[in-house]
Image: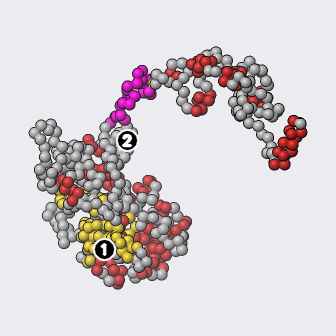
């Protein structure tokens, strides 16, 4: 099968794909019960088709769990497929026998995501690289070791590292060893499964430049799986966007970033940060969560989160079709539209569609056409030059409060706030228990009007009161101890004795500072607690007998 690649070849030149994938499906069965009965399946990859051409890099992007890694591992048969075909260099990989598959894997390699777990810790670097050379009969003995040294130098490491073990290297160095192992057999196709996601930013740039140099030197084709769209744009020629096991859009790199057609692609591109201070983007926030791949929604898998959804999306699954030159999209919105299709904006109001977007239901009184395509995509993804556009003002719920206003820095000024109209200090217990709305002078006036303890209980505090104590070591509490001087003025910071605390102002005498802690419990506390030892039953009986004798 041949296909037209709208790229560098001369016009009219047909290029045969190196890898053709058609209808690829990979379901992981869910077993339950004593006999392992299959009760369901996780649809990791659901009907995926694409082509990869010689010396081309196809980037595969999408959210975590969308099936990117499963696609890469299935096409080289690290995972057995459920359905579909993968034709590599004219041969179906899924129907190969063990001997034929081993010979084909010399031309298909993979760079794993985790550089720590992908290398055997019991083997030296020379053994990790040289085993494949010996297995395929390329080099043996000293020639194998010499080839390993050459590859280490080619990926930017020293040849003397050939006798070291993986634990002696950093993460970036381990990833370079993985790349050297992948290119050791001079393959034609390499799956880069998150090859730079576990590396620092500076090391990512070095590894990406290394991959591009190796591609030019060995004429390699890459399937580059990644989350970082900025990295994919730097290295990829074409990009395939996946969502819940399906490819929703596929295009050349430049056209995808300039004219994203699918609503999900627009949401992904809006999440790319702009490396410029003060520059804002029109951020698209998708509602809801990714559906469960065990029971995906009917129709379009994205319709549960799509702002442009209409009735047809919920019942009929769209097919991927060409909407622009070299640009494919799987969306009902772009059926029966003018060529080339222009993006529908996800930021505009959802279209009101009865059957298809080709025949929208609009009235003659509408001033704007909600189906009108976006003419300037820069307004969506370039953002505004100014800073935060949110206005500063009084919230709607507080606009009805009389006297509510704004301070010099945009803060709310509450007319009932004591600190905005008086300099008097609230009581300490009021501050600790929560915000107070009453000034100190008003609190003093209300305290003077309150009845005293003698007025409440003229005969004393009562026999059952907790303030009554029969312990002679505890002094009696007088009602005057609870009535501070109501001056209505702010107390001084230091008293006459020079103590930096206003607690002594409520004491009748001027005790030294070292005795202050002993007087506070008896003078400043309403509740008197005594620490008396527990009374046993024998002592209680003796005390009762003594009382009877005294009464006689």
Find out whether residue 395 is within the magenta segment. Answer: yes
Disc 2 crowd rating (10 Å Cα; few below 14, some 14-19, many 20+) is: few
| Residue identified by numbered label 2 | 276
Q: Quadrant of residue 234?
A: bottom left
Residue 82's tag is 1
Q: Can you say whether 128 is above or below 465 in the image?
A: below
Question: Magenta segment range?
Answer: 385-412
Query: What x and y, as percent, mark residue 530?
Result: 76, 37
Q: Main secondary structure of the magenta part?
A: loop
The answer to whether residue 202 is visible is yes
> What sort of colour scheme is used for the picture?
secondary structure
Disc 1 crowd rating (10 Å Cα; few below 14, some 14-19, many 20+) is: some
Marks 1 and 2, how far apart in space? 46 Å
The answer to whether residue 234 is visible is no
Q: Quadrant of residue 7?
A: bottom left
Residue at image coords 54%, 70%? 164
Residue at image coords 24%, 53%? 262
Q: Can you say whether 76 is above or below 170 in the image?
A: below
Considering the image in quadrants, where does the N terminus appear? bottom left
Query: What x and y, as percent, mark residue 207?
Result: 41, 60
Q: Can you say whether 468 is above or below 100 in the image?
A: above
Residue 390's tag is none
Q: Quadrant of residue 319?
A: bottom left
Query: What x and y, as percent, mark residue 438?
Result: 54, 23
SS at circle 1: loop
Q: Which is closer to the viewer, label 1 or label 2?
A: 1
Find out whether residue 147 is within the magenta segment. Answer: no
Residue at image coords 86%, 38%? 547
User: Camera-side residue: 418 or 449?
Assistant: 449
Q: Earlier in the sequence, mark 1 or mark 2?
A: 1
């Amino acid at each position: 099968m041949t296909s037209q690649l709208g790229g560098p070849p001369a016009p009219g030149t047909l290029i045969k794909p190196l890898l053709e994938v058609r209808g690829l499906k990979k379901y992981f069965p869910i077993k339950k019960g004593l006999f392992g009965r299959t009760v369901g399946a996780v649809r990791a990859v659901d009907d995926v088709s694409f082509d990869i051409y010689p010396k081309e890099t196809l980037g595969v992007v999408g959210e975590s769990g969308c099936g990117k890694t499963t696609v890469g591992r299935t096409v080289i048969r690290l995972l057995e497929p459920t359905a579909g075909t993968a034709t590599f260099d004219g041969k179906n990989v899924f129907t190969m026998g063990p001997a034929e598959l081993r010979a084909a894997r010399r031309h298909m390699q993979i760079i794993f995501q985790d550089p720590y777990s992908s290398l055997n810790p019991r083997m030296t670097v020379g053994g990790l690289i040289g085993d494949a050379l010996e297995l395929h009969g390329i080099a043996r003995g000293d020639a194998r070791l010499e080839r390993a040294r050459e590859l280490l130098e080619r990926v930017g490491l020293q040849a003397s590292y050939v006798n070291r073990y993986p634990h002696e290297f950093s993460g970036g160095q381990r990833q370079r060893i993985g790349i050297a192992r992948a290119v050791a057999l001079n393959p034609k196709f390499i799956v880069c499964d998150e090859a730079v996601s576990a590396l620092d930013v500076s090391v990512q740039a070095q590894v990406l430049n290394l991959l591009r140099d190796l591609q030019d030197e060995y004429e390699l084709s890459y399937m580059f799986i990644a989350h970082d769209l900025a990295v994919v744009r730097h290295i990829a020629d074409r990009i395939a966007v996946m969502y819940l096991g399906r490819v929703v859009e596929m295009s050349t790199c430049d056209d995808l970033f300039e004219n994203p057609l699918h609503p999900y692609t627009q949401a992904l591109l809006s999440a790319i940060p702009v490396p410029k201070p003060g520059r804002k983007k029109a951020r698209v926030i998708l509602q809801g969560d990714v559906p469960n791949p065990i029971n995906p929604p009917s129709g379009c898998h994205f319709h549960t989160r799509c702002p442009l959804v209409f009735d047809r999306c919920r019942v009929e699954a769209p097919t991927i079709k060409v909407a622009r030159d070299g640009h494919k999209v799987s969306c009902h919105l772009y059926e029966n539209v003018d060529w080339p299709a222009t993006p529908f904006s996800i930021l505009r109001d959802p279209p009101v569609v009865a059957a298809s977007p080709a025949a929208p239901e609009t009235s003659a009184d509408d001033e704007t056409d909600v189906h009108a395509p976006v003419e300037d995509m820069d307004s969506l993804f370039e953002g505004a030059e100014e800073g935060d556009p949110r206005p500063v003002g009084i919230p709607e719920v507080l606009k009805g409060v009389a006297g509510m206003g704004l301070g010099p820095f945009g803060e709310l000024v509450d007319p009932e706030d004591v600190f905005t109209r008086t300099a008097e200090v609230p009581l300490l217990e009021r501050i600790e228990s929560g915000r107070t709305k009453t000034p100190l002078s008003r609190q003093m006036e209300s305290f003077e009007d309150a009845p005293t303890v003698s007025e409440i209980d003229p005969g004393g505090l009562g026999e059952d009161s907790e303030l009554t104590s029969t312990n002679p070591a505890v002094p009696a509490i007088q009602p005057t101890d609870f009535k501070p001087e109501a001056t209505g003025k702010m107390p001084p910071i230091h008293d006459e004795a020079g103590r930096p605390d206003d607690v002594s102002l409520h004491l009748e005498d001027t005790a030294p500072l070292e005795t202050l802690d002993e007087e506070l419990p008896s003078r400043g506390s309403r509740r008197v607690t005594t620490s008396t030892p527990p009374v046993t039953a024998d002592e209680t009986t003796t005390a009762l007998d003594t009382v009877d004798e005294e009464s006689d």
